[in-house]
Amino acid sequence: MADIHECSKLKVNFPRKRNNPTVKRKKLLSSDYIIKKRQPFDTKKKRRNNDIYITNSTNFKAQLKRCEKHLNNSTSEVIIHGLGAAVQRACSLALQLKKNHYDSIELEVKTSTISIIDDFEPVNDNAGYEIINRKNSAVHIRVFRKFSLRTLKYQE
């Protein structure tokens, strides 16, 4: 086997710059536009009862209580969705649920990137209507029981 220093023929020079031209986004002044943000999650897809969307503005204990209610009463699983800055809060909520249930529940974590569309509506007639498409990270955590509560009940 040849040493890397001996094989000068294997040396490949990669181009430093991409061949694609880069398009710079123009600066939009907030005084000239009204920013309207669209819903980030797909609203066409039917939301289930066990889907919980986490935000930074909602009280953490209220979100925890809502997840507990779903896990104890109606469903055996809860899906927690967090977007952007709420990713950390969604992870904390899932870990707190696992701790509260003494590791009797499992977590299945998926990450994704979601496109977010911002509409810039002009205040004056001389400015044009602009649409900005940007990406944001998201997390989807499936919280489910390892075993059913029915199997734990005492049977005679």
Image (spheres, rainbow, N blue to C red):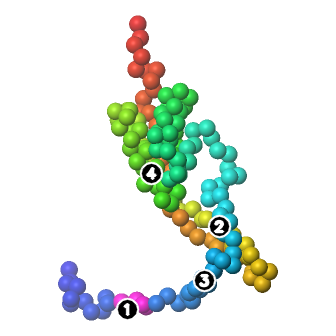
Is there any visible trace of residue 70 in the rendered image?
A: yes
Q: Which mark is residue 137?
A: none
Left or right of residue 140: residue 134: right
Q: Amino acid at mark 4?
A: Arg
Q: Are marks 3 and 1 in contact (CB under 8 Å)?
A: no
Q: Residue at x 19, y 84 (%)?
A: 3
- Residue 83 or residue 103, whichever sits in front: 83
Disc 3 is placed on an element classified as loop
- Which sits earlier in the primary sequence, circle 3 or circle 1? 1
| Disc 4 secondary structure class | helix
Q: Around disc 2, counting alpha carbons within 10 Å, would you say few (fewer than 14), some (14 to 19), or many (20 or more)?
A: some
**Residue with the mark numbered 1:** 13
**Which residue matches tag 2?**
117
Q: Earlier in the sequence, mark 2 or mark 3?
A: 3
Q: What's the residue at 53%, 33% (across, down)?
A: 70
Q: Are marks 4 and 1 in contact (CB under 8 Å)?
A: no
Q: Position of residue 124 (x, y in %)?
A: 77, 79
Report the side of 124 relative to 138 (left or right).
right
Residue kind at label 3, given as amino acid type: Lys
* Residue under pointer 3: 27
Q: Sort mark 3 into few (<14), some (14-19) or many (20+) by Cα contacts within 10 Å.
A: few
Residue 22 picture quarter:
bottom right
| Distance from Cα at disc 3 to Cα at disc 1 | 36 Å
Q: How much space separates mark 2 and mark 3, taking CA atoms? A: 16 Å
Lower sequence index among marks 2 and 1: 1
In the rendered image, the quadrant that contains the C terminus is top left
Decide which of tag 4 and tag 1 comes sooner along the chain.
1
